[in-house]
Amino acid sequence: MDMYHRYRELGAASGFTVLPEHPARLAKGCPPEVPGVAPGQYVFNTLEVERSARAVSLSTNLNGIGVRDSIVARFVVGTDGQVDPVTVQFPYPPVAPVLDTAIRDQLAVARFEPAVHAGGCAVPQSIELRFTSIASK
């Protein structure tokens, strides 16, 4: 499949299936019932929600902790607008321990507007954010 040209494929490439939409995007109910997953257990991504989770109180600037780095953190924002601490990951290690701790501390007190699925239902969403730290002088 060619995403760089105006040609529209007439069918799926061998071994692939073309879906009209993401199955989770079409899920109904509150919480939305995603096929093959227990109700309330599915974690949505950006393409599957009407409105993504938005930070209300969060600083991604970690200056002055003695480390200079830029780190991506992946985590889940729950329907309560809080980060589930068990889900915090750093997909591109290594991460300095002081930076790991600082990011986890920031996420522990962060607040978000939860993601919203069709019909206005709050749903958990997987998020990736970049945190930046400039070493203190």
Image (cartoon, rainbow, N blue to C red):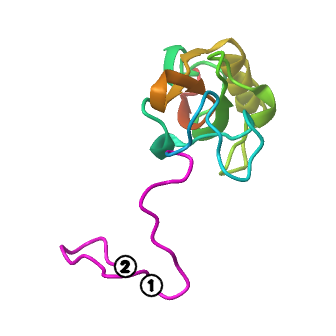
Residue 132 position, x and y percent, is: 53, 31
Q: Provide the residue designation for mark 2.
A: 1
Q: Provide the residue designation for mark 1.
A: 13
- Name the side, left or right, on which 82 lies relative to 70: right
**110 and 43: which one is in front?**
43
Picture quarter with the C terminus: top right
Residue 20 position, x and y percent, is: 41, 61
The image quadrant that residue 71 belongs to is top right
Residue 25 position, x and y percent, is: 50, 45
Mark 2 near mark 1, Cβ–Cβ under 8 Å? Answer: yes
Q: Residue at x 50, y 19 (%)?
A: 55
Check the image and report above or below for 8 versus 133: below
Magenta part of the protein: which range? Answer: 1-25
Please tell me whether residue 42 belongs to the stretch shown in magenta: no
| Disc 2 element | loop
Q: Residue furthest front?
A: 29
Q: Please tell me how crowded label 1 is: few (under 14), some (14-19), or many (20+) other residues with Cα within 10 Å.
A: few
Q: Please tell me how crowded label 2 is: few (under 14), some (14-19), or many (20+) other residues with Cα within 10 Å.
A: few
- Amino acid tagged 2: Met
Distance Cα–Cα, label 2 vs label 1:
7 Å
Picture quarter with the N terminus: bottom left
- Amino acid tagged 1: Ala
Q: Residue at x 57, y 36 (%)?
A: 127
Q: Is residue 110 visible?
A: yes
Q: Residue at x 71, y 50 (%)?
A: 93
